[in-house]
Amino acid sequence: MFETTVRDGVCQIRRKGARWLSTAWDGGYRTADAVYNVTVPEGFERTDLAAYRAERLSGAGFAIGPTLLTGVHMEHARCARSGPVSVLATAGLSNPAALPMSAAGPADGFDGRASDPADRPDWRPGTVNLVVGVERELDDGALATLLASAVEAKAATLLDAADAPGTTSDAAIVGCVPDAERASFAGSATEIGAAARVCVRDAIRASLAARYGGDALPTVDGAEYGVVTDRDTEVFEP
């Protein structure tokens, strides 16, 4: 079973011998006994991320492992479990990344259209981070499919909640257990994929509720920071 421990702003998700796929700065496929979700302080400007990770994890008494960073406090982290799948989420929406389906884009008043939020001195990343653990053995392709299933569910959940499929700094880690029962696939029609989708949905919703309480969730129209991807493309037949 994937076990969680929170200490000093660090959440450890542990499963001995697990195989992981991460989208973080140190991402890719890794074998590690634990991965982490770490709250960074307001005004965070460190670029030596490996050194910063080592400081935070060792300071909390943890071994080094794949790590996600977020501006969301760990008190707002929430988990969901269904069958062999468990998901941890931290969700903040200060910097939505909108993808309009028409030239009109979001309503007037969203001021992040042409800006890079990381250039703003008072910017604090909202970030939706996910850690998905599966008590099954998956090969590299199926683990990548699990990542796609989780990100798809994240986008659907956030579109419903805040009219944006994500933020500018979302990240995810998905993991499996090499010596467990084997699963060949992890798409939305499989036991693994279906469980991951509902767990992602419910963990994100619970984290948003914890983060924002009874307040209305930030939306693209009212966000102070974020981006709208509205560039043109050339569409052609292959």
Image (spheres, rainbow, N blue to C red):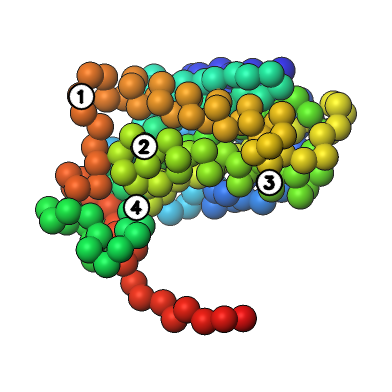
Q: On the image, numbered disc 2 is attached to which residue?
A: 160
Residue furthest out toward the front: 237
Q: On the image, numbered disc 4 is attached to which residue?
A: 97
User: Which label's residue is closer to the chain start, 4 or 2?
Assistant: 4
Categorize mark 3 by other alpha carbons within 10 Å: few (<14), some (14-19), many (20+): some
Q: Tell me the CA gap for discs 2 and 1.
A: 16 Å
User: Which label's residue is closer to the chain start, 3 or 4?
Assistant: 4
Of tags 3 and 2, which is closer to the observer?
Answer: 2
Q: Which amino acid, mark 3?
A: Thr
Residue 9 seen anywhere in this rendered image of the structure:
no
User: Which label's residue is closer to the chain start, 3 or 1?
Assistant: 3
Q: Tell me the CA gap for discs 3 and 2.
A: 23 Å
- Tell me the SS state at disc 4: strand
Instruction: Identify which residue is drawn at 61% across, 46% down.
Output: 148
Report the side of 118 relative to 184 (left or right).
left
Instruction: Identify which residue is drawn at 53% across, 43% down.
Output: 151
Pinpoint residue 161: horizontal percent, then vertical percent. 33, 34
- The vertical placement of 127 against 131, above or below, is below
Does the residue at mark 1 contact the one at mark 4 (Cβ under 8 Å)?
Answer: no
Q: Which amino acid, mark 1?
A: Asp
Which mark, residue 215? 1
Which mark, residue 128? none
Report the side of 153 relative to 159 (left or right).
right
Which mark, residue 145? 3
Question: 62 or 122: which is nearer to us?
Answer: 122
- Tell me the SS state at disc 2: helix
Q: Which amino acid, mark 4?
A: Ala
Instruction: Identify which residue is drawn at 75% across, 37% down.
Output: 19
Pinpoint residue 36: horizontal percent, then vertical percent. 56, 32
Q: Tell me the CA gap for discs 3 and 4.
A: 23 Å
